[in-house]
């Protein structure tokens, strides 16, 4: 409850910050986009990780205002980048029930960001409560021109039926599988199968949590489209990202 009160103040008081993690093309190594990841700099408690406060934001309903802030901040930043990379934004389940397409359209209009440069990341937990409604939301988002990615693929309840029913533009293989490709034959098989699935469905696959060159070599060998992880860069503050983009040809 204490954190909930602090969080309300955090939103009003500049304590939230958006970091960005680079996403690269597996073959060329070129930048394709950045995922926005929220950070909370608590004045007394220091840095609080999203896993510790996003659930509180969802319970209190604050996630709606925080979600708007994240979307507006990410779109404003991306609109200023020298090159037209995509920005990917995580959306919490509750946001789907609060006029998400209208809010997204307004924010794109406000910030001037081209719709095709925004990617919305959804997890399966956001879809299971009311699949019919979730599908309508995804279709409305796609009608605006934004792309939609299925995040944390493989960790949800019924990934395959979700892929069948939803027109996702990207599959993000969860980092738990990627990071185990060398130590677990099962994890390696799951990553391979996901890449095959993506290829058959014509949906590009991004691997998360790529930390080593052997992870990368495996993914390249299996035809993974794009990668994200500490090997390429940690989540970084916006000014570092802007400089990184300025250095890019
Ligand atoms: O960046 P980090 O590994 O600490 O993120 C932890 C979790 O918090 C991830 O599952 C990520 O999807 C989630 N997360 C990070 N930023 C946001 C955000 O802006 N909105 C929502 N809903 N979740 C986020
Ligand atoms: O939205 P999602 O649940 O996919 O959030 C991605 C999370 O993974 C973020 O918290 C981010 O900080 C974290 N992350 C990104 N790259 C790596 C990595 O290479 N290794 C590990 N352990 N975590 C990562
Ligand atoms: Mn994500
Ligand atoms: Na993920």
Image (tube, rainbow, N blue to C red):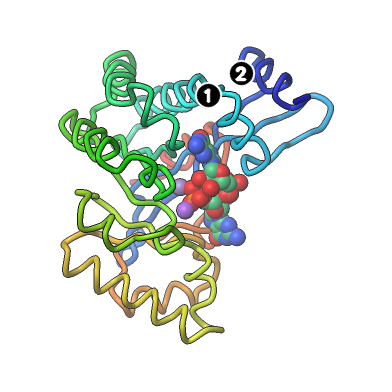
Taking the spot 28% from the left edge, 25% from the top edge, the residue there is 101
Q: Nearer the viewer, residue 53 or 179?
A: 53
Pointer 1 residue: 66
Q: Nearer the viewer, residue 221 or 44?
A: 44
Residue 11 badge = 2
Q: Earlier in the sequence, mark 2 or mark 1?
A: 2
Q: Position of residue 215 (x, y in %)?
A: 48, 74
Mark 2 vs 1: CB contact within 8 A: yes
Q: Position of residue 25 (x, y in %)?
A: 32, 59
Q: Nearer the viewer, residue 67 or 158?
A: 158
Residue 168 badge = none
Taking the spot 25% from the left edge, 59% from the top edge, the residue there is 204
Label 1 Cα crowd, 10 Å radius (few <14 / some 14-19 / many 20+): many
Q: Position of residue 222 (x, y in %)?
A: 31, 78
Locate residue 110: give its quadrant: top left
Mark 1 Cβ and ligand 1 under 8 Å apart: yes
Locate residue 194: give its quadrant: bottom left
């Amino acid at each position: 409850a204490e954190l909930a009160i602090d969080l309300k103040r955090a939103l009003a008081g500049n304590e939230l910050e958006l970091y960005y993690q680079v996403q690269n093309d597996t073959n060329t190594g070129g930048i394709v986009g950045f995922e926005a990841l929220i950070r909370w700099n608590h004045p007394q408690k220091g840095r609080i990780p999203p896993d510790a406060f996003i659930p509180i934001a969802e319970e209190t309903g604050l996630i709606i205002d925080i979600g708007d802030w994240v979307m507006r901040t990410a779109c404003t930043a991306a609109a200023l980048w020298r090159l037209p990379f995509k920005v990917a934004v995580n959306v919490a389940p509750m946001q789907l029930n609060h006029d998400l397409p209208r809010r997204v359209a307004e924010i794109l209009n406000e910030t001037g960001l081209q719709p095709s440069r925004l990617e919305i990341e959804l997890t399966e937990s956001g879809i299971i409560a009311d699949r019919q409604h979730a599908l309508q939301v995804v279709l409305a988002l796609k009608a605006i021109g934004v792309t939609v990615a299925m995040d944390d693929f493989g960790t949800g309840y019924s990934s395959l039926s979700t892929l069948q029913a939803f027109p996702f533009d990207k599959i993000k293989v969860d980092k738990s599988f990627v990071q185990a490709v060398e130590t677990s034959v099962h994890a390696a098989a799951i990553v391979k199968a996901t890449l095959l699935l993506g290829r058959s469905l014509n949906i590009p696959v991004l691997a998360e949590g790529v930390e080593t060159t052997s992870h990368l070599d495996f993914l390249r060998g299996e035809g993974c489209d794009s990668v994200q992880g500490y090997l390429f860069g940690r989540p970084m503050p916006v000014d570092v990202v802007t400089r990184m983009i300025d250095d890019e040809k």
